[in-house]
Image (cartoon, rainbow, N blue to C red):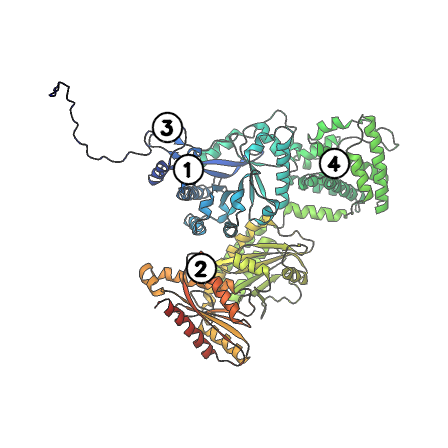
Amino acid sequence: MAVGAQGQPRLPVAPPRAPGPPSDPLADLPDDGPIGARAIRAALDRDLLEVHYQPVVVLPSRHVVGFEALARIRLPDGRLVQPSRFIPEAERTGLVVPLGLDVLRKAAAAAARWRAGTSPVATATVSVNVASPQLEEPGFLDVVRAVLADNDLPGSALVLEITESVATSGRVRPLLEQLAALGVRIALDDFGIGFATLDNLRRLPVQVLKLDRSFVAGVIRPGTDRAIVRVVVDLADTLGLSVIAEGVETVDQADVLLRLGCAHVQGYLFARPGPSPEAVAAGVVAAGPPQSGNRRGDADDGWDPALDAGVLAATRLLAGPDDRARAAVHAVATQAGRVAGLSEGAVRTIGRLALVHDLHRITVDGVLPPAFAAAPVLCRLAEVRLPAVGPGADGGSRPGHRCSADAHDAVRDDAEMHVLLHAVEAVAQGLHIDPDLSPDALAAGLRVVAARYAAAEHECGGGGDTVVPLLTALSLDPPDLVPLVDLLDDLDRRRLGRRGMEERLRSLVGITRVLAGSRDIRELLRVALEEVRRIVGAASASLERWERENSQIRTLVNVGVLGPGEQVFPESETYALAEYDQIRHTMLGRLPYIHTVDDPHADPAAIALLGSLHKYSSAAVPIYLEGRVWGQLWLTTEVGEPAFGVGDIELLTAVATLMGTVVVQAENLDRAARLAFEDPLTHVGNRRALDDALGELAAAARPVAIALLDVDLLKQINDTEGHAVGDQALMRLADVLSAHVSGAPGALVGRLGGDEFCVVVPDWSPAQMERLVEDTLATLASGGGPTVSWGIATAIGPWEPRILLATADAELYAAKGRRRLP
C-alpha cells in the first residue's frame, strides 16, 4: 500500500465512469405496494399490459353471458401486478387515459375473436371500466366508434362500466347518450355506494347496475344488506334495467341472490380472472350449477316464463266457457300482491299460480298427465295444492288441515310469497262457495272469507295477522275482473313475445331479397320497411328523412295499420323539428325515443300525433349513413298491444341499421335527383336551394335575417393537413348550424360554395341571428374548431336577394379584414 508524506495510507482513486443507461423502472420492484408512474409508463411502452377476464354468469344454469376486462401488468420476470397497485397512480397522473385505451382495444379484439366462433360464449359481451379522465377526452366517442369498426363489433357487444359519481356529472351525460346511441351499454359500477339518485337513474342512458360487493357479502343474513339487494332488484325490474351482483364467493350468497331475483352474478365462486376468456368460461361450465344444502327445489327459483305454456294449457283444461270465478281468483291474488308491496315478478308468479290453483282436478289416479310432467313447479303445485288452510264447506275444519308454518316449508321459504299463496287458497274456497261475482257479491264474499280464515288461523295458534288484513282491504276496494279469455290471450301473447323467432328470420331473409332484386326506389323502401315492421312486431312503421336544409323530416313511406289520413307514399307529410321535441331528440341527440300516450313526461305534440293515429306507443330510432344521422324509423303499437319498452332498444337499433343498408341502395339510385338541391359533401342545401328559398321570401316581402359564415384558412388546412381534414371542418360547421337553427320555423342552411355557408331565417331580428352565430362559435370552439368569420344582414319590406347577400358578404369580409385573414 502506498504511504503519503505524513505516513498516512493513500487510497486509490477510481477512474471516472462513463454515464450508463438509465435504470429500468420495472427492475427490482417489490412484491407488494404501489408502483410509480415511471413503471406504469414503461409497462405501456413495452406492451406489458395484460387483460384478464372474469365471467358474468346466469344462475342457475351458469351460462356465461359476458366478461369483465381487468387490467394487469406482467413484469419482465413473470410476476403479475394487480390493478390495486397501479390504477390509483395512473388516475392521479393521467396515465389512466392511455392505459384505458389499451385495455379497450385488447378487450374488443378478444371479444371479436370469441364472437366469431361457435362456442357457447359466441354472444357474450365484454365490459370495460372507464375512468372520468377518459370520458373527458374530446375524442373518446370517436375512439369507441373506431374500436368497434376495426373489430367488426356491434355496439351491443360492448359494456362500459362507470361509477355513479362519473355518470351524474353534467359534463359526461351528453357523451353517455351518444355512446348509448351507438348501441353501447352503460353500466353503473359499485352501485349503491355512490351518488346516483332515482331521478338520475330514470334519465341516464344506463342499462346495467352492478351491485357493490359490500352488499353481496351480507346478503346471506336477514337485515339491511338483504333488504337493499331486494329493493335494488325490484327498482331495476321496474326501470327495465339489469342487475349484476359482484363479489359472489359462496354458494349461499348465490342461492339467496337467486331467490331475491338477481340471477346475473360474477365472483370467485365461479371463476377467477384469467387471460383466456374461452378457458375461463369452460371452467365455469364444467363446474356445474352450485349446490346448497338449503335449496328447496325448483319453486325457490322464482317463476320460469317457460312454464307459461303449461299454465296456459292447464287453465284451458280446467276453465269453463265463462269461468268468472277463476278470473276473480286471479284478480284478487294479483291485487293482493300489489297491496302487499311485492315486486312485479312475485305478482306475476302468484297470478300464474292462481290460474291453476285447482290443478289437481286434472290428475289421473293422482298423477299429472305427461304433458305437464316436465313442469316441476306445476308438479309441485299439484302435490301441495297450495296451503290447505281454511274452513270446509260446512264452516268446520277441513280434513288434512295444516297450519301455516307447515305449508311454508312445503311451498317456498319466502314469507311474502306465503301470504299470497294463502290468499289464493282462501279466495278460491270462498268464491267457489259463492259463484255470484258481481262487484258487491265479490266484496261480501271477501269479507266472509277473511272472517273464516281468521278463525282458522286462530285454531292453529296464529293471529290472522297476514292474509286477513289483505282480504279485508280488498273487500273495501275489490279489483276489476278481467274476462278469463282476455287473461289467457294476454298470457299467450307474453309467452310468445311480440315477435316470434321464425317470423324474424323470415323477415331478415325478406330484406336480403329486397336488396338483391328491387330497382324501383319506392318499392324498395316499402318492401324493406314492411319486413322491418314484421321483425319488430309493430302495428305500423314509417321511414322519415331529415331535410337539414329546412330543419324538418319528411315521411317517405308508411306501412302497416295506417291511421286516419296516412298514405303509403304521402305527397307532403313533413314534421318541423321546431314543433316536435321528440324528433329533435332523435335527430340531434342521436338517441332512440320511446313513449306511450299516457306518458306524462313525453312531448305533448308527439302524444297528440299518436292519439290522432289511434296508436298506443311509439318508438323513434335514428338511421345512420356514413356516421351521420340520415333520418329515422318511426314505429307504433296499437291500443291493447304490448308497448315498446327499454328492452326493445337493442332490436330497434339493429333494424335501423338494416334499414340504413336499404337506404344506401335507394340513395344510390336517387342520387342525381337529390343533388339538384343538396350539397353532396355536407348534405345541407346547395346554392340552388338557397336561391329558390330567398326568391320565395323576397316575392312575399317577408322579413328575413341571413348570416354568411366562412371557414377560416381552409386552403391552409387543406395544404398542411390534407383535404380530408378540410372536408371534416366543412361538415362540422354544417352540422352545428343545422342543430342550432332546428328550433326556428322555416330556417334554411345552405352551402354557397367552397368554404362559405349561408343561414336564412324568416322573421328573425339581427339580435336573434347574432345569438345564433355566437352559439355556433361557442359550440365549434368547445369541439376543437374550426374557426369562422361571419357577416349578418336583415331585410324588412321589399328587398332583393342579390342586395341582401352582398350586404352580408361585405360584413363578412370586413370581419376578415379586422382579423387580417385572407
Which residue sits at x=51%, y=62%?
739
Position above or below: 192 against 590:
above
Q: Secondary structure at mark 2?
A: helix
The residue labelled by disc 3 is 30
Q: Which residue is mark 4?
A: 420
- Residue 783 sits above or below residue 686 on the image: above
Report the disc number at residue 780: 2
Q: CA distance from mark 4 to mark 2?
A: 60 Å
Sequence-first disc among 1 and 2: 1
Type of the residue with mark 1: Glu
The amino acid type of the residue labelled 4 equals: Leu
- Percent x, y of residue 512: 50, 56
Instruction: Name the kind of residue labelled 3 in the image.
Output: Pro
Q: In front here: 756 or 238?
A: 756
Q: Is residue 519 visible?
A: no
How busy is the neighbourhood of tag 1: few (under 14 within 10 Å), some, or many (20 plus)?
some
Seen from the viewer's position, the closer of residues 611 and 98 is 98
Q: Are marks 4 and 2 in contact (CB under 8 Å)?
A: no
Q: CA distance from mark 4 to mark 1?
A: 54 Å
> SS for tag 4?
helix
Q: Tell which circle, 4 or 2, labels the residue nearer the N-terminal end.
A: 4
Q: Name the residue carrying label 1.
A: 89
Residue 597 picture location, percent across and down = 67, 56
